[in-house]
């Protein structure tokens, strides 16, 4: 019962389809518009290159991630060590690629998790209103007021032995609130639409209406927000890792590499510059895609871009 | 009322979490020579930090004191209230400078970029804002330090100027150079952290103001003002910008409040003894009462910011009335 389905135009004489019929519905036109936007193409290209680099880089490098070159501590970039070595003799290129892998995974997982939570909390609050809404929105407000850094910093040392996936869960727990409020607002208006009312009169259970009709019709908002949450997650992870509350050794992320490299940034800049440069590029690319998506999916923002 | 309840619950949650997860006892057990367990217990009882006392009981004592305005004692035995008084002023000095400079520049650049939409200035300012927004606050602060060290070396070699950019604390301890010397010293210490804060604010405000201005520029009242014979400059400044500033002022109010709660990274990296760095230090020293006090302060800041921005919006925009 999606509202975005369009009837294909009848083929013209000679069997030629009308040009507008070639677009495959709303998402097809959105995709076309995105691919015509230079900043989105740039963002997608950067992310594609970085993703390939992150996973292929360690394979083509002569050094393993855990390997140490004890003859070369803090050596500048050279044919032997493409991006130099750190203070433990580890190859900076390989470490940065592995860190990039972790940052990409953390960003994506946190974004998906937090957007999922936001969609459910916001949709249930907006659909049921009353006590459900009051309770859920009160919890949302409380989460907004609680200093997230404080809770992450206190809880993570206790849970750090359970691996970085726990860190992903903790990060996601503090990135859903603003989106949930937006979803709630949209749900309140969507629940009065004809197709939702029809489903209700047909006796479809509330949870089915929420998952089948309301959340899918907010997909544009959720996609944009998930994209923005990717960069938010990466930035928060970097900040926490800098103070030792993030990804823990032997795992590395761009944040934890920046934390180590920052102490030697003046004397041995390669330990800081490469991981920082990649982090900024990654976040910038994600933000550009998010901005392009917002323009493509939100008619209001088009004239502002 | 709802705001007050949220602050109380948030502070209580922070206290309970800190009291159950942190261990102030460690500070005493790591001393050399190591004090006896009885001595440690006595000291912790005195500070209401003894983990052998039931959590509910400790909370009752602490909450009772907080109601009278006393946030208790730190792990070292000093008053939390005294620390708050000093540290709020430190944070405030940094935030006022950073947010005001960043927001003012951001608003000016954003408004001008909107007027010159798609021009080179718009493209350049948008690119700059996007770039800054992609850099974490931690990285901005560290990068500025690296640049400052390089510039200090350059200025020292070229002009014989001693270290101009200073990035350790908010003043040089034990410096006695009279009033002007003290002001100059504080200014030198303020430059880098202020730039670090202002950059982020500039990026956010320029994007926000540009969007607000573009919304207004297409409005009927701006066209009407021009049709009535107002110059373009007058129509833009007196009508468009004034209207576009309404949401920006409320955004500024909210940002200012949130910043009071959140300059943690900048303060810590530049070693400013403000509220933000206190949060990190108090977690490191397992200081339950300090953590709870900072949490309460942060919650109050966020709630006050939300409340004030709502009121301000209703006051500035005649179309809105907050019920």
Image: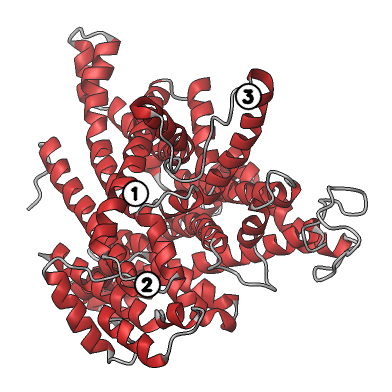
Q: Residue at x 87, y 60 (%)?
A: A61
Relative to residue A9, is residue A84 drawn left or right?
right
Q: Nearer the viewer, residue B34 or B285?
A: B34
Report the residue marked by disc 3. B155
Q: What separation in Å lies between label 2 and label 1 (alpha carbons)?
A: 23 Å
User: Residue placed at 10% from the left, 36% from the top?
Assistant: B318
| Residue bearing the label numbered 2 | B287
Question: Residue B260 appears at what percent x and percent y?
Answer: 31, 50
Residue A302's place in the image compared with A233, above or below, is: above
Question: Of marks 2 and 1, which one's residue comes earlier in the chain?
Answer: 1
Does residue A18 appear in this view?
A: no
Question: Which residue position is annotated with label 1?
Answer: B259
Element type where label 3 sits in the image: helix
Query: Residue A3, position in %: x, y?
Result: 38, 60
The answer to whether any part of residue B243 appears in the image is yes
Could you tell me which residue is drawn at 81 percent across and 54 percent down?
A: A74
Tell me if A97 is positioned left or right of A106 in this view: right
């Amino acid at each position: 019962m999606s509202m975005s389905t369009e009837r294909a135009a009848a083929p013209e004489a000679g069997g030629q389809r009308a040009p507008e019929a070639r677009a495959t519905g709303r998402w097809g036109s959105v995709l076309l518009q995105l691919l015509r936007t230079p900043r989105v193409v740039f963002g997608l290209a950067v992310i594609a290159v970085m993703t390939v680099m992150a996973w292929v880089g360690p394979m083509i490098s002569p050094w393993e991630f855990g390997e140490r070159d004890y003859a070369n501590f803090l050596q500048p970039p050279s044919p032997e060590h493409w991006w130099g070595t750190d203070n433990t003799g580890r190859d900076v290129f390989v470490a940065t690629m592995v860190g990039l892998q972790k940052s990409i995974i953390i960003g994506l997982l946190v974004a998906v998790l937090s957007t999922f939570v936001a969609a459910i909390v916001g949709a249930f609050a907006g659909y049921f209103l009353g006590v459900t809404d009051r309770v859920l929105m009160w919890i949302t407000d409380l989460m907004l007021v609680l200093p997230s850094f404080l809770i992450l910093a206190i809880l993570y040392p206790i849970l750090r032995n359970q691996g970085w996936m726990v860190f992903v869960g903790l990060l996601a727990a503090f990135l859903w609130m603003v989106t949930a409020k937006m979803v709630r607002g949209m749900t309140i208006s969507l629940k009065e639409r004809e197709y939702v009312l029809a489903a209700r009169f047909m006796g479809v259970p509330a949870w089915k209406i929420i998952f089948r009709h309301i959340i899918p019709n907010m997909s544009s908002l959720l996609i944009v927000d998930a994209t923005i949450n990717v960069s938010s997650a990466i930035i928060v992870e970097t900040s926490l890792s800098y103070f030792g509350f993030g990804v823990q050794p032997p795992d590395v992320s761009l944040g934890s590499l920046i934390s180590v490299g920052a102490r030697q940034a003046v004397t041995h800049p390669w330990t800081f510059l490469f991981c920082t440069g990649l982090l900024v590029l990654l976040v910038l690319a994600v933000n550009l895609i998010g901005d392009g998506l917002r323009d493509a999916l939100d008619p209001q923002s088009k004239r502002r871009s | 009322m709802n705001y007050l309840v949220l602050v109380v619950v948030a502070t209580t949650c922070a206290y309970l979490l800190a009291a159950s997860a942190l261990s102030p006892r460690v500070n005493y057990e790591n001393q050399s020579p190591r004090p006896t367990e009885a001595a440690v217990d006595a000291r912790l009882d005195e500070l209401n930090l003894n983990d052998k006392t039931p959590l509910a009981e400790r909370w009752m004592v602490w909450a009772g004191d907080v109601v009278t305005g006393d946030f208790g004692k730190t792990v070292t035995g000093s008053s939390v209230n005294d620390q708050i008084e000093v540290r709020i002023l430190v944070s405030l000095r940094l935030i006022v400078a950073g947010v005001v400079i960043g927001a003012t520049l951001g608003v000016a650049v954003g408004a001008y970029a909107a007027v010159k939409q798609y021009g080179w200035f718009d493209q350049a300012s948008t690119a700059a804002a996007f770039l800054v927004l992609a850099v974490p606050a931690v990285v901005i602060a560290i990068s500025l330090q690296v640049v400052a060290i390089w510039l200090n070396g350059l200025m020292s070699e070229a002009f014989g100027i001693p270290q101009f950019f200073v990035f350790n604390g908010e003043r040089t301890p034990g410096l006695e150079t009279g009033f002007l010397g003290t002001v100059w010293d504080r200014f030198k210490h303020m430059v880098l952290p202020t730039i670090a804060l202002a950059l982020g604010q500039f990026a956010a405000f320029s994007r926000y103001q540009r969007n607000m201005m573009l919304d207004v520029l297409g409005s009927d009242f701006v066209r009407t003002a021009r049709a009535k014979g107002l110059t373009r400059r007058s129509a833009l400044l007196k009508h468009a910008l004034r209207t576009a500033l309404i949401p920006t002022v409320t955004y500024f109010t909210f940002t200012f409040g949130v910043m009071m709660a959140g300059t943690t990274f900048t303060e810590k990296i530049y070693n400013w003894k403000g509220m933000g760095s206190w949060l990190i230090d108090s977690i490191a020293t397992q200081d339950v009462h300090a953590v709870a006090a900072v949490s309460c302060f942060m919650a109050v800041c966020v709630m006050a910011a939300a409340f004030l921005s709502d009121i301000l919006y209703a006051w500035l925009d005649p179309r809105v009335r907050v019920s």
